[in-house]
Structure formats: C-alpha cells, structure tokens
Amino acid sequence: MKGHFGRAIPPAARRADAAGVVLGVILTVAVTCGAGEVKRDKWPCAFVEKKIPDLQIPVVMDVPKIDRFSISGGTIQLTRVSEGTYQGCCTLTVTCTFDLTLFCSIEPTGIMPGDYSCSIDAPEISAPYGTARLCAEVHNAQTGNLPAKDSVMVAVVKVRMAPR
C-alpha cells in the first residue's frame, strides 16, 4: 500500500503546491521588508558624546628586598703615631642578605681641630656575612685645649652601605 498515494496525485497538482509555498514565502519577505523601511530624513543628525574612562596600565619593577642587615663595631681609640698625627681602627662585622659596599665619612665634634679622614679596608661584603676594617686618622691635631679626662669624643664616623 505504501507509495500508492504519491502516484495517485497527478504531477501538475504537486507543482501547484510547490508554487503556492514559494508564493507565500515571497509575500512574507515583501511584507517584512516593507515594514522596516529606513527613511534618510528621519535619521539622527547629532552625535552623542560618551566619556570612555582612561586606560590605566600599572608600571612595576622588582626592588631588592632587604630582609636583614646589621653592622656592629666598637669604638675607635685614636693613638699617637707621630707629632700631631693620631690613628685608630676597629673591626666591623656585617650580617646581610645581599652583597653590599660600605662607605664612610667623618665629622669632627670641634673639640680638637685637625684634618680628619676615614677609610674602610675591604669595603665589599658578600652575603651572608663579612668583616671590614674601619680606620680614622687625624693630621695636624691641636691637642692644647683638650680636657684632661679619658675617652673624649673628638669625631663621629658615619658608615653607609649600597647594594652591589
């Protein structure tokens, strides 16, 4: 029984059904396109200003982290080397988590006039620890106005460091 109904409909009738479907699709498209017509004289003429936020891009860098850094040292006791010249040294013990270089400067207190200088022997220290020798020296020292007591502070040495 299958296939007998297809043969029962004449070919001309089958073409008429297909033509009807095509005509329906054409009418639907025509009605839809006509409804969405854009008129140029009704188009918006002014632009609307919209503020867009600035793009922010962070700038970063790696900074050496100083976890631990310490310098310890005793006092420098000046002793007479020659007429008007005094010299003394102490040992600095450095503990650090990075390689560094030591620098020094000396400031007289004004009690004893003279030409002061300081120096550091082996100023480059490698982590984790190291030692350096800090020396102070005075030339043309004028000791006439010094008070008669022990351990008179005649200068202060400042030790600075810089990472290597």
Image (spheres, grey):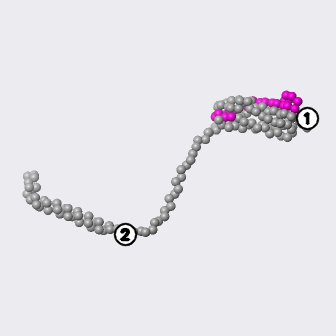
Name above or below for residue 58 compared with residue 131: below
Question: Please, what is the three-letter code of the amino acid marked with disc 1?
Answer: Ala
Of 103 and 92, which appears nearest the observer? 103
Q: Quadrant of residue 147?
A: top right
Q: Which mark is residue 40?
A: 2
Tell whether 46 sits left or right of 155.
left
| Residue at (82% x, 37% y) in the render | 155
Q: In the rendering, at what x and y percent does residue 82 appear?
A: 86, 28
Circle 1 sits on which residue? 148
Q: Which mark is residue 110?
A: none
Q: In the rendering, at what x and y percent does residue 158 appear?
A: 76, 38
Q: Are marks 2 and 1 in contact (CB under 8 Å)?
A: no
In which quadrant will I find the C terminus? top right
Question: Please, what is the three-letter code of the amino acid marked with disc 2?
Answer: Arg
Q: Quadrant of residue 66?
A: top right
Q: Residues within 10 Å of mark 2 (few under 14, many from 20)?
A: few
User: Which contiguous range is marked in magenta?
Assistant: 79-101
Using the rendered image of the protein, determine whether residue 45 is visible from the camera's viewpoint: yes
The outermost residue toward the bottom is 41
85 magenta-colored? yes
Tell whether 70 sits left or right of 20.
right
Q: Quadrant of residue 113?
A: top right
Query: Of helix, strand and loop, which one carries label 2?
Result: helix
Tell whether 92 sits left or right of 48.
right
Tell whether 18 sits left or right of 114.
left
Q: In the rendering, at what x and y percent does residue 17 appear?
A: 15, 61
